[in-house]
Image: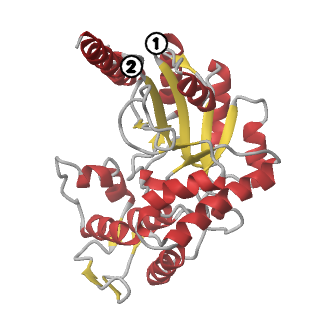
Amino acid sequence: MKGVGIRKIMRAARRLAMMFGPRAVILLYHRVAESELDPYRLVVKPQNFEEHLRVIREAGNPMRLGELVRRLREGTMPERAVCVTFDDGYQDNLYTAKPLLERYGVPATVFMTTGTIGRRREFWWDELERVFLQPGRLPGRLQMDELHLDWDLDGSSDYTEDDAQRHRAWTIRGADGPNVARDPTPRHAVFRAIYHLVRPMNDAAQRRVLDCLLTWAGMAPAVRATHRALEPEEIVDLERGGLLDAGAHTVNHLALSTQPAEVQREEIRRSKADLEHWLGHAVKSFAYPYGLHSEEAVGAVHEAGFEYACACVSTVVRRNSDLFLLPRVDVFDWDGDEFSRHLKRWFGA
């Protein structure tokens, strides 16, 4: 009986160690840029990003994502570890974020969506924003059989520079959050509805919808310099110097959990192969687009030979965290003080 009691105490001690042991934080960024419009809350201004890095250096223990994984495997995860990651592979990750990361000596992993290379198109969500939320005139009615849509823009066909400035703080996240923000115009309502209809589609369907929308709007496919993805030679430049690593983020940024198993496997396998071809070395890390994953996707990440993968579960990393579903916390365009408050909260301070 005495042995049973000791085992219970030891199990309880292990549970407490898991609960109150060291925490690590993996930060999720997308873009570092100056932007007039940010409906998805993907952009952090350079000044704020620099303040974040200063806080990380002062209050955290910045380390590579691969090093954190190694320490997790060994059971030696240090206190207050912080890893910086970026999703998608926008050009500003190289030209704006990298110099700041180098200035403060903070490593980062950038997860690349490889199918944007050579397509001469923006990410579908950026094209959608260009159609609806940039100033200009649209037809008064939108009918799309594929989406079963018949929308009347109800007086918001014309969208002026003043309108765009007036509504520049509106975000799709705010509209979908617990404190529901009203769509300020029918354009915003249509934009949000189409976003949620398109996101679970496959790549071909997404392109068909965006092609139809561009034709309806009288626009041509274009790539704004501010919204383009990195080219292969730029991904090589991103890794030059050894502070930043490239990871895979599928080929077409599909919501994997909505796709057939064979599509999930090919998206995962091919994104790894693309990056390894361009970089000339093994790629060990993966991130699930939108943070969405399935049992098939996690299995395919294992099969493809990745060593770890990031999701978007908004919590901290602990000793027992799944290495193929590592949690990350979203970082928004906070100033240094607000970022510091969040970091303290994540660390339980």
Q: Residue furthest right?
A: 280
Vertical placement of 41 versus 159: above or below? above
Helix or strand or loop: what does disc 1 sit on? helix
How crowded pointer 1 is (Cα within 10 Å; few <14, some 14-19, many 20+) is rated as: some
Of tags 1 and 2, the one toward the viewer is 1
SS type, badge 2? helix
Identify the disc placed on residue 340. 2
Residue found at x 77% / y 41%: 237
Tell me where residue 312 appears, x and y as whole percent. 41, 44
Q: Residue at x 66, y 33 (%)?
A: 98
Query: Decide: marks 1, 2 in contact (CB < 8 A)?
Result: yes
What residue does disc 1 label?
59
Q: CA distance from mark 1 to mark 2?
A: 8 Å
| Residue 226 visible at all | no
Q: Position of residue 334 (x, y in %)?
A: 39, 30
Amino acid, disc 1: Ala
